[in-house]
């Protein structure tokens, strides 16, 4: 069997590695350097408990993938010989007022009812764990099992592991997916017809631009996220910190990642004054001692956003052999191990280990 994976980010490359290690010939097609878009622009939070506001299929998907992470990264490190920056740091989701504290209390309650570790901390208890936190922090939820990984270390390790597993990478533009008589035949790649038994669409925010699939530009859209990197010679925090939509992610080497905006501005990756101001103000509100810490870098990534905030997973209707793995929005890093496993099971004709119907691509046309 031969598979073509359209998209060489963390989702596409993880799928390619999964297929190749199960004896399938795989070629990854990407318009640029693999992993150079949203995958390396991400902060790398592995935080289903901090991200989810309710139980449901998406929460289950994120939890399952988080469970796979320790073994998955150990395998990548062994195969690639590279370290991936996986850090079981835990996460503190802080509240600055009574309304935020009430919402955190409700989240802790339903997660504890599901048997998950989630703990309420007063402001004083939170500052005992993170002394640099602002005095204005009223309370926090401690999610001890929400961790982090460094995407700028993870992607090179994943690419090396895939290459050593005989995955082939080709740079160029996929113009369309080709099919005949209800069966996928391959892709038009820079005018060259490449044939395959199965095509996996994992092109992130660019997935809907490839013709020959049922996706429209409204189904998957780019959502810009702006981030900044600070560097402190002495570590100011040890946990990932979250407040509303923003976060601070401390790396082991003193770097601190600050993010992120969420802007539907098309394929514009500019860092703007307004966007940068928002995330820096959030950082100072959380940790005032950052005021004199230098900003080392700023960047923006385009994440694949869907209207219902669910990824698109599974084989499409009408054309067999066309499998979708896109629309992961800000959870692509977290969901890579489980997405790869589920797509591998689908390609091999096995029953997926989790119900993928809530994420089925046909939900848009219906």
Image (tube, rainbow, N blue to C red):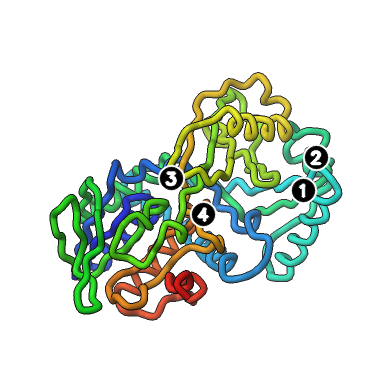
Residue 146 appears in view: yes
User: Which sits earlier in the primary sequence, circle 3 or circle 4?
Assistant: 3
- The numbered disc on residue 140 is 1
Residue 203 pos. (x, y %): 35, 54
* Residue depicted at 31% across the width and 57% down the height: 210
Instruction: Give the CA distance from mark 1 to mark 4.
Output: 22 Å
Location of residue 5 with respect to 125 vertically, above or below: below
**Label drawn at residue 137:** 2
Residue 362 coordinates in the image, percent (x, y): 43, 73
Picture coordinates of residue 51, whole percent (x, y): 63, 55
Q: Nearer the viewer, residue 287 or 125?
A: 287
- The residue sitting at 50% across, 46% down in the picture is 149
In this view, the residue farthest toward the right is: 98
Query: Disc 3 versus disc 4: distance between alpha carbons?
Result: 11 Å
Residue 136 as seen in the image, left or right of residue 245: right
- State which mark lies toward you, 4 or 2: 4
Q: Earlier in the sequence, mark 1 or mark 4?
A: 1
Asked if disc 1 and disc 2 are in contact, CB closer than 8 Å, the reply is yes
Foreground pick, 130 / 184: 184
* Label placed on residue 331: 4
Q: CA distance from mark 2 to mark 3?
A: 31 Å
Q: Secondary structure beneath disc 2?
A: loop
Most distant residue in the left direction: 192
Question: Residue, x 23% and y 76% (percent of image)?
Answer: 183
- Circle 2 residues within 10 Å: few <14, some 14–19, many ≥20: many
Q: Which residue is mark 3?
A: 38
Q: Secondary structure at mark 1?
A: strand
State yes or no: discs 3 and 4 in contact (Cβ < 8 Å): no
The circle drawn on residue 45 is none
**For the residues marked 4 and 2, what is the alpha-carbon distance in whole angstroms?**
27 Å
């Amino acid at each position: 069997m031969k598979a073509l994976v359209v998209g060489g980010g963390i989702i596409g490359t993880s799928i390619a590695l999964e297929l190749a290690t199960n004896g399938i010939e795989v070629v990854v097609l990407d318009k640029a350097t693999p992993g150079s878009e949203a995958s390396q622009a991400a902060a790398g939070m592995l935080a289903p408990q901090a991200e989810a506001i309710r139980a449901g299929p998406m929460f289950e998907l994120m939890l399952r993938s988080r469970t796979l992470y320790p073994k998955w990264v150990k395998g990548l490190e062994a195969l690639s010989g590279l370290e991936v920056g996986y850090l079981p740091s835990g996460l503190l989701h802080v509240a600055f007022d009574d309304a935020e504290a009430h919402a955190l209390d409700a989240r802790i309650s339903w997660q504890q009812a599901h048997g998950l570790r989630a703990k309420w901390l007063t402001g004083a208890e939170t500052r005992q764990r993170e002394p640099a936190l602002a005095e204005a922090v009223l309370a926090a939820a401690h999610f001890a099992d929400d961790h982090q990984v460094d995407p700028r270390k993870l992607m090179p390790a994943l690419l090396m592991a895939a290459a050593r597993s005989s995955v082939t990478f080709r740079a160029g533009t996929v113009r369309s997916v080709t099919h005949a008589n209800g069966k996928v035949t391959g892709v038009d790649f820079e005018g060259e017809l490449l044939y395959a038994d199965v095509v996996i669409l994992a092109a992130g925010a660019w997935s809907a631009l490839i013709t020959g699939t049922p996706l429209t530009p409204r189904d998957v859209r780019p959502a810009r996220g702006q981030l900044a990197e600070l560097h402190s010679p002495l570590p100011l925090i040890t946990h990932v910190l979250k407040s509303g939509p923003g976060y601070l992610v401390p790396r082991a080497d003193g770097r601190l990642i600050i993010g992120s905006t969420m802007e539907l501005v098309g394929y514009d990756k500019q860092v703007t004054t307004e966007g940068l101001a928002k995330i820096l103000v959030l950082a100072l509100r959380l940790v005032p001692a950052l005021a004199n810490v230098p900003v080392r870098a700023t960047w923006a990534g385009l994440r694949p956003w869907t209207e219902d905030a669910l990824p698109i997973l599974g084989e499409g209707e009408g054309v067999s052999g066309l499998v979708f793995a896109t629309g992961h929005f800000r959870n692509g890093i977290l969901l890579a191990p489980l997405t790869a496993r589920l797509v591998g099971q689908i390609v091999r004709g096995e029953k997926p280990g989790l119900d993928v119907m809530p994420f089925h691509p046909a939900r848009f046309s219906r």
